[in-house]
Image: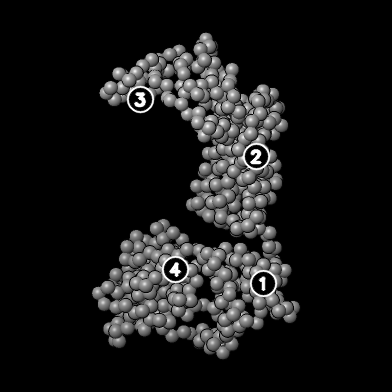
Amino acid sequence: MDEPDLFTAAAEERQAKEPGRAPLAVRMRPRTLDEVAGQRQLLKDGSPLRRLVSGSRGPAATSSVILWGPPGTGKTTLAHVISQAVEGRFVELSAITAGVKEVRAVIEGARRAVGMSGKETVLFLDEIHRFSKAQQDSLLPAVENRWVTLIAATTENPYFSVISPLLSRSLLLTLESLTDDDVRALLHRAVADERGLGGALELTAEAEDHLVRLAGGDARRALTTLEAAAGAALEKSEPAITLATTETAVNKAAVRYDKDGDQHYDVASALIKSIRGSDVDATLHYLARMIEAGEDPRFIARRLMISASEDIGLADPTALQTAVAAAQAVALIGFPEARIILSQAAIALALAAKSNAAYLAIDAALADVRQGLAGAVPPHLRDAHYGGAGKLGHGQGYQYPHDLPGGIAAQQYAPDSVHGKVYYRPTRHGGEARYADVVEWTRGRLAGAPAGPAREKGPREPVRKGPAVAPAPAPAPAAAAGDADGGAEQGSGAEGGTAGKGTGEKGE
């Protein structure tokens, strides 16, 4: 296990003589921890990885570690840096090709090395989640007795893919996807370093931005795409790697989308307005542009949640549930599968009946409060549970609605300054039409109208059905606050009606 076979030795010898034949990602592999891109949280002084590289020994020697993170975050790179730094034996296995036999051979070799020369063995096991429970069990004696220091790498959640006894004997270190700045630094070094392009080409800002987006936080992918673009530029005798060359080399057009600039806000705004306008195809187009440009899926999910309340509201009470469920699923899953969840939610929202009545209602109420219309709470509604409240008149005259027919008491709830104001003006779109009936009946009972047959409350009408119904009478116009993405349009359903704006005027 210590000696490479004939073909491996020949390949390594050839690579040493012709380093340019190795992939760029291999040539640029860091030689020290200081060259590692990202993962600053794991490389601080005194961290397990620093101590492992420095060869800390004794009663507080570094424990075995499990490196957990997405592809391209540096798990294998960290192992190779450690292999060059340790003074003892370094053995590398892959769970894809190795089995219990190979693991036991390494462990036996480690025990001999300790007994004969005192040298310790560092075992790097890649893709440990591919090992069965029995294969992982074979590692336990060596890890527990420190015959080997295990460095295991996995892209799967180790709490599900690694057996508990092995987890308890190791330190779990979580690697994070590289930031855009980390990837940029990596590209700059690869362009300038003699191991990389050696300054033979320049990298334009547009091409660099495109490569960063394509990388998606994956260092290996960033270097692979850079190498393809550089090869295309050299073949055409160009002095620089341009956006056009990069697009041709990697067969992927650059999406005109700047996550920190106007395009970010323009496309996000267009997505929301397409949902509001019930254009499902335009909705999917803008969603695809955001996904392809590398937009944070959590940002997209937050926009959908806002739209579900701002533009749909009670016209389809299930819209917010759909959007919230999508946001939770996206946070758990991430790309690429998150695109399906976002698509489902966006389609549901685009096709839902529309109403901005809830949005206008709260803004109208806020406007009155900000103008000072926040009078005293009526005495019969004030807290009366403490001693002395009765002497102040608190709670006197309060009618308990549950004791009355219909469950509605004809009593004043709002302060005098806003008594009789109407904030919520439901539309007749989708399920909100039934809410409109409930509002009409309850407002009449609160004003002292005779009790009639109670209307059904808590309606659920998740999808628009049948022909359009007549819109609610339009109230007096009033300015509404701008929407969350910069517009001030009103929500409308497929029926073609337009929701009335909240005015704060007195009602019936």
> Which of 242 and 120 lies nearest the eye of the viewer?
242
> Which of 16 and 324 lies nearest the eye of the viewer?
324
The quarter of the image holding the C terminus is top right
Q: Amino acid at mark 1?
A: Thr
Extreme residue in the top direction: 450
Q: Which residue is mark 2?
A: 488
Q: Is mark 1 in CB contact (under 8 Å) with mark 4?
A: no
Q: Which residue is mark 1?
A: 204
Q: Is mark 3 in CB contact (under 8 Å) with mark 2?
A: no
Whichever of callouts 1 and 4 sits on the residue coming sooner in the sequence is: 4
Residue 404, located in which quarter of the rendered image? top left
Whichever of callouts 3 and 2 sits on the residue coming sooner in the sequence is: 3
Q: Nearer the viewer, mark 4 or mark 2?
A: 2
Q: Which residue is mark 3?
A: 383
Q: Position of residue 205 (x, y in %)?
A: 65, 69
Say whether residue 124 is left or right of residue 239: left
Q: Which residue is mark 4?
A: 40
Q: Amino acid at mark 3?
A: Asp
